[in-house]
Image (cartoon, rainbow, N blue to C red):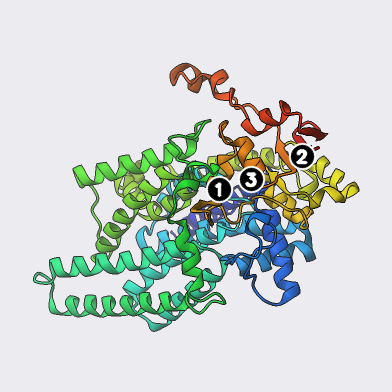
């Protein structure tokens, strides 16, 4: 019996080791496959914080908003990211950013097996759910600051479970520290606060609905938990007010109530409206919806531990909210993966639990180990490390034009109307450029609208001339149009017209080309630059 048990454990350990090596390689390949448009300004701001020994309070890169108040809600993460990049290089930075979601997924696995499922037979299904979640969230990973919210939200879910079962003040203290650090690193702490107070609300409602049927000792337990959770929520909120920005952090983030950017910035678009289709995201959302419908209609889940049921249903409710968020924006997909993971593992375990004895789980794990090793070797061949991301990815960024500016720095003093996506790239390579816009402040109020709205007003045929004149623009830098390629399903089943989709004109460039007031300054395979005569 002992030998058999050890044999099963050895196979299980080998399975998870190879599994997470594969996950890490996928994440690392993803990190080196593209350059986040905002990384440039993150690094530049991190450098300024290190040099000036204080957080930025006004922005200096956009001439349109020069010296306007600015809250860098990612200041601590920008400082850490720059320090790693400067001292250890981009390859090390990419490895660390690949380890962040990997750590999150390991924590999800360990907690699910400790709290919800305690058998070795479920490993294959847990791994499958994590693979599906990984590919659904992959576009949100890479050298991107939002990864920290993925990790911290997972930690928060685990802490909420511990707070329920253990009711220790040490868990409260850890949660408070988590929110303070989170508020210094990323605006995603607001999602964390929402989850925290939502959990408190659900627990209060469940208690009020069931208080008459609860036994005295259980009622005391629930009341103590609600009190401790309430204290935790309140103190966690207060902890977010003692960052260097204080209340100004909330004032700044309040501007995100404007929704214009959600329909004009790629990562904020709905997966239902995004072309080409995001199949992994749509599949995962559909899977979660089907499981929830199955649960609500047939109520097939039976949970043995008494304290698990409330946890299970609050996660179900928060997942329904995150389904809505994921359908409204690509960016929210990691939230759905986190909130749905635990009840999906419970569902699958309950669904197939009675059939485990008929399945040769160890044999399947050995086969899976072999396949994952083969796939890992395959992935390694596609990983292309780079030590300088700003001189690579030149199909998408103005690398050669950047060199042109190094030779001709006088053009950086011009009032530039620039391509939105390149703002961060220019801030890192040419911080003295006078940019119209970059990715830091799309929602910033500007002339009774947002700066992003004003940017898009330039692309109205009836106003392009007036806008260029109004702002005295004397230089324009834009990308050349790139075509979107559709697959067979999109063309033949969904009947999307590829030619029509790609027949989009750049109103500003078209106007400039036809105007005698402007002349071409620079052109290469992906960049166009014009100056006023």
Mark 3 near mark 1, Cβ–Cβ under 8 Å? no
Pair 3/1: label in front: 3
| Residue 233 percent coordinates (x, y) | 36, 74
Q: CA distance from mark 2 to mark 3?
A: 33 Å
Residue positioned 15% across, 69% down in the render: 208
Q: Quadrant of residue 503?
A: top right
In this figure, which residue is indicated by the disc labeled 3?
Answer: 470
Q: Is residue 318 left or right of residue 472?
A: left
Say which quadrant the C terminus sits in: top right
Which residue sits furthest top?
492
Which residue sits furthest bottom?
169
Say which quadrant the N terminus sits in: bottom left
Q: Dot 1: few (<14), some (14–19), or many (≥20) neighbours within 10 Å?
A: many
Mark 2 near mark 3, Cβ–Cβ under 8 Å? no
Q: Which mark is residue 394?
A: 2
Of residues 369 and 169, the one nearer the viewer is: 169
Q: Which mark is residue 452?
A: 1
Of residues 450 and 473, the one nearer the viewer is: 473
Asked if residue 196 is positioned above or below residue 319 in the image, the reply reads below
Q: Is residue 215 left or right of residue 355?
A: left
Reading the chain from its start, which is encountered first: label 2 or label 1?
Answer: 2
């Amino acid at each position: 019996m002992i030998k058999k048990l050890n044999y099963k454990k050895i196979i299980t350990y080998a399975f998870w080791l190879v599994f997470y090596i594969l996950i890490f390689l996928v994440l690392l390949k993803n990190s080196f496959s593209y350059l986040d448009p905002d990384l440039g300004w993150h690094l530049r701001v991190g450098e300024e914080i290190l040099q000036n020994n204080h957080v930025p309070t006004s922005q200096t890169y956009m001439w349109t908003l020069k010296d306007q108040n600015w809250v860098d809600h990612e200041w601590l993460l920008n400082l850490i990211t720059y320090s790693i990049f400067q001292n250890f290089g981009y390859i090390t930075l990419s490895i660390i950013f690949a380890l962040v979601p990997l750590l999150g997924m390991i924590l999800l696995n360990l907690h699910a097996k400790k709290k919800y499922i305690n058998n070795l037979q479920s490993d294959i299904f847990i791994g499958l759910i994590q693979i599906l979640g990984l590919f659904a969230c992959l576009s949100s990973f890479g050298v991107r600051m939002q990864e920290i919210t993925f990790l911290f939200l997972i930690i928060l879910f685990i802490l909420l479970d511990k707070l329920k079962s253990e009711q220790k003040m040490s868990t409260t203290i850890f949660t408070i520290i988590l929110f303070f650090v989170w508020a210094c690193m990323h605006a995603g702490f607001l999602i964390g606060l929402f989850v925290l107070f939502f959990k408190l609300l659900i627990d209060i409602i469940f208690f009020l609905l069931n208080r008459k049927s609860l036994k005295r000792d259980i009622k005391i337990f629930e009341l103590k938990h609600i009190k401790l959770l309430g204290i935790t929520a309140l103190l966690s909120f207060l902890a977010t007010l003692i960052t260097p920005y204080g209340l100004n952090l909330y004032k700044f983030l309040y501007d995100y109530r404007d929704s214009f950017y959600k329909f004009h910035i790629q990562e904020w678009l709905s997966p239902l409206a995004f072309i080409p289709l995001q199949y992994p995201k749509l599949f995962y959302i559909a899977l979660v919806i089907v499981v929830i419908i199955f649960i609500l209609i047939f109520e097939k889940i039976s949970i043995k531990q008494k304290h698990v049921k409330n946890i299970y249903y609050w996660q179900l409710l928060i997942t329904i909210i995150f389904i809505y968020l994921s359908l409204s924006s690509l960016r929210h997909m990691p939230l759905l993966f986190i909130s749905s993971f635990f009840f999906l593992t419970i569902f699958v375990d309950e669904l197939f639990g009675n059939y485990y004895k008929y399945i040769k789980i160890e044999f399947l794990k050995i086969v899976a180990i072999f396949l994952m090793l083969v796939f890992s070797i395959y992935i390694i061949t596609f990983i292309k490390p780079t030590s300088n991301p700003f001189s690579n990815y030149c199909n998408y960024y103005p690398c050669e034009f950047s060199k042109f500016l190094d030779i001709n720095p006088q053009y950086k003093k011009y009032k530039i109307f620039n391509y939105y996506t390149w703002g961060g790239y220019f801030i890192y390579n040419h911080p003295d450029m006078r940019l119209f816009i970059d990715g830091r402040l799309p929602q910033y109020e500007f002339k009774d609208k947002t700066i992003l709205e004003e940017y898009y007003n330039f692309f109205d045929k009836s106003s392009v001339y007036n806008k260029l004149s109004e702002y005295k623009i004397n230089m324009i830098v834009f990308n050349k149009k790139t075509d979107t390629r559709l697959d067979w399903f999109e063309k033949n089943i969904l009947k999307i017209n590829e030619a029509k989709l790609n027949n989009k004109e750049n109103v500003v460039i078209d106007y400039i080309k036809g105007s005698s007031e402007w002349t071409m300054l620079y052109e290469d395979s992906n960049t166009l630059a014009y100056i006023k005569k």
